[in-house]
Image (cartoon, rainbow, N blue to C red):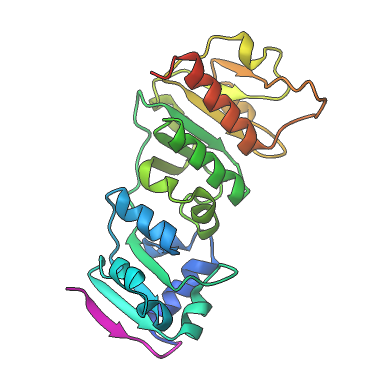
Amino acid sequence: MSAVQAITSRDNPLLVRLRRLARHGTAYRQEGVVWIEGEHLCSALLQRGGAAVQAVLSETAWQQPALRALAQSAPRVACVPDALFDGLSALGSATGIGFVLDLPAALEPAPGLPTVVLDRVQDAGNVGSILRSAAALGFTQVVALSGTAGLWSPKVLRAGMGAQFGLRLVEAVGDEALAGLAVPLLAADSHAPRALHESPLPFPCAWVFGHEGQGVAAAVAARCAQALRIPQPGGEESLNVAAAAAICLFATRQAGGWQ
C-alpha cells in the first residue's frame, strides 16, 4: 500500500524541487530525477516496465478512481490542492497527476544497435518527434551529442509521448563516442549529391540528423560512410529535421524488408 501524504504548503521541499524540474529543461541532470506529467506519460512508463518513486496528485484527481489507482502504483503519493498542482504544471490545462522517477544511469553508446544520432538538434518538439519515430521504426538507441535539447526535459517528454521509456538513451557526449557504434553512419544532408533512394541503405545503421539551421557538423560528417538527401520535387530548400528523420528511418526499414 502506498504511503499517502497531504501537502498544503507551496514551500514544501518536494514542490519546490518539482517546480524547478518543470521550468528548467536540464534541471533533471542536477537533481538526478525526472518529472513526468499527465495520465498518458504516467501510464506509458508503467506499460514499458518502468517505475515511479513518487506520485503527485491533485485533490480533484484523487477523487477519480482511475487516476488514484495509477498514482498508487508508486510507493509514495503526495496529494496537493489543485492550485498547488497547477503551479507544477507546464501544460495548458493541468491533468492532476505526475510521477517522479529516477534518472536512468548515464550510458555509453552500445555497438551494433540501430541508432539515431542527434547533432545539436535544439528544438524540443523536433527532438521528441524524432524519438517517437525512432521507437516506432525499431531504432532502439538514440545518441544525443552535446548541444542537443535534453532528452528528459519536460518539453521533449511531452513531444516524445513516452518514446523515451522504450529507448536506450545516451546524451551529452562528444562525437568521439560515435566510434563505439560499430555500424555504418549515414548523414542526412539536403545538399548531398546522392538521393536517399539511389543508395543501398544498410541495417542496422546509425542515422545522423543535425542542427536545424547548420546541419551536421563537419567533424561528425567526417565519421559518416555517406551523406544522403531527400528528393524534394516541390522545390522546398529543406525539410523540418523531424520530418526528414521520419522519412529516412522509414526508408531504411523498408529497404531492409522490415527485418
In the image, residue 159 above or below residue 68: above
Task: Name the foreground residue: 40 vs 33.
Answer: 40
Query: Magenta segment: does it hold 201?
Result: no
Magenta-drawn stretch, dominant element (helix, strand or loop): loop
In the image, residue 172 above or below residue 158: above
What is the quadrant of the C terminus in the image?
A: top left
Instruction: Please give the range of residues in magenta.
Output: 1-10
Task: Name the foreground residue: 88 vs 146.
Answer: 88
Residue 221 is at least partly visible in this image: yes
In the image, residue 97 above or below residue 152: below
Horizontal relation, residue 91 to residue 168: left or right: right
In the image, residue 36 above or below residue 217: below
Residue 55 position within the rendered picture, expressed as x and y whole percent measured from the top left: 33, 70
Task: Name the foreground residue: 217 vs 143.
Answer: 143
Residue 103 is at least partly visible in this image: no
Residue for point 53% across, 47% down: 128
